[in-house]
């Protein structure tokens, strides 16, 4: 992972830190598998709690 990838992840983590409905931030793709290039994007998924849903 390159510094700009880590910075993007940290920026999103900071924005979501106080959200009780966010259960997890998952990193996938080339970064998670260890073969990212400087030009790679950051693939992320959120696990979100559903309150009062059907």
Image (cartoon, rainbow, N blue to C red):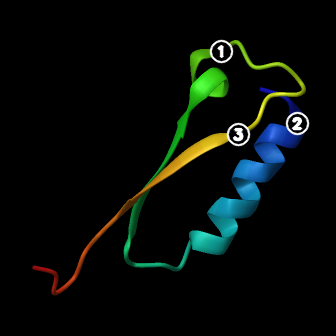
> Which of the two discs, 3 and 1, sits closer to the camera?
3
Q: Is the C-beta separation of discs 3 and 1 under 8 Å? A: no
Q: Which residue is mark 3?
A: 42
Q: Is the C-beta separation of discs 2 and 1 under 8 Å? A: no
Q: On screen, 4 above or below 8? A: above
First of labels 3, 1 by sequence position:
1
- Quadrant where the C terminus lies? bottom left
Percent position of residue 28, x then y: 54, 32
Percent position of residue 21, x then y: 37, 75
Q: Which residue is mark 2?
A: 3
Q: Residue at x 68, y 62 (%)?
A: 12
Q: On screen, 42 above or below 16? A: above
Of 15 and 38, which appears nearest the observer? 38
Percent position of residue 53, x then y: 16, 81
Residue 34 is labelled as: 1
C-alpha separation, residue under disc 2 versus residue under disc 1: 14 Å
């Amino acid at each position: 992972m390159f510094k700009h990838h880590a910075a993007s992840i940290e920026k999103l983590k900071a924005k979501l830190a106080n959200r009780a409905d966010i259960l997890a931030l998952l990193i996938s793709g080339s970064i998670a598998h260890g073969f990212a290039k400087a030009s790679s994007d950051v693939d992320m998924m959120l696990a979100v709690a559903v309150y009062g849903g059907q």
